[in-house]
Image (cartoon, grey):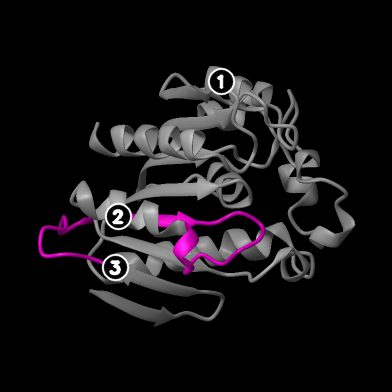
Amino acid sequence: MSTSISLPKSELLLSKSKNSSTDTIVLFLPGISGKAFSDRFQSVVDISLKTGYPIARMSAWESEADVQQKTYFHYQSAVIEALEHLHTLGYKKIIAIGKSFGGGLFLSLHHDAIIKKILWAPALGFAQVSTLEKLRNETLSQIENLKEIKLSPSFLSSDKAKLCFIHGTEDTAIPISTSRAFALANPNAHIVEVKGADHSFKTPESERELNEATEQFLRE
């Protein structure tokens, strides 16, 4: 059963089954190319329902061109708006799954409702000094690369959620070294390295490993 929910800054597509958990839900964010409701991401819906969780896919942008028109803060606010709406529906605990741009957004936010984050090659940078506050109000068209938005060890270590980074070893868009650094900065984090996978996990083998790692962390 699926229900469409319109919010001021986004739209949610909520899918659940009779066996779904009552107070915990998965919130999924796609990469910068968007299309959260497409068949491309049906696998994450299937995995969530299989493990007993309802899932809300969030659509706040349609394409990279759309993303470029707004600020990082705008999209952070859209995520918080979605979290608060899910709370009104009775979901007190959130498991966040985000791909690339969506994964970076989840990593950049600390929220008490989020108990787990499964981050597929999150599109952000790492540095000893965070640039998040400096750049979060810049229109994304003014930021040459999302890796310029950097998170610091102190920011990452203060995240109370359990973190699972899933990253391909042949990712040329966001180097796997970034997720390795993220994971080392938080004692509640670990990383799954998918050998030979690129940023989009395009091959059947890498997609299978991505899905298996996602399901395993959902079950933990």
* Residue 148 vertical placement versus 195 (above, below): below
**Tag shown at residue 15:** 3
Residue 173, image x, y percentages: 74, 37
**Tag shown at residue 46:** 2
Residue 116, image x, y percentages: 37, 40
Q: Is residue 159 visible?
A: no
* Residue 188 vertical placement versus 209 (above, below): above
* Neighbourhood count class around disc 1 (C-alpha, 10 Å): few under 14, some 14–19, many 20 upward: some
Q: Are marks 2 and 1 in contact (CB under 8 Å)?
A: no
Foreground disc of the pair 3, 1: 3
**Tag shown at residue 185:** 1
For image coordinates 42% across by 64% down, the residue present is: 57
Q: Measure the C-alpha gap from mark 2 to mark 1.
A: 31 Å
* Residue 136 vertical placement versus 57 (above, below): above
The answer to which image quadrant residue 21 occupies is: bottom left
Q: Nearer the viewer, residue 215 or 163?
A: 215
**213 in the magenta segment:** no
Kind of residue at badge 1: Ala
Q: Earlier in the sequence, mark 3 or mark 1?
A: 3
Q: Which residues are magenta?
A: 15-40
Foreground disc of the pair 3, 2: 2
Q: Earlier in the sequence, mark 3 or mark 2?
A: 3
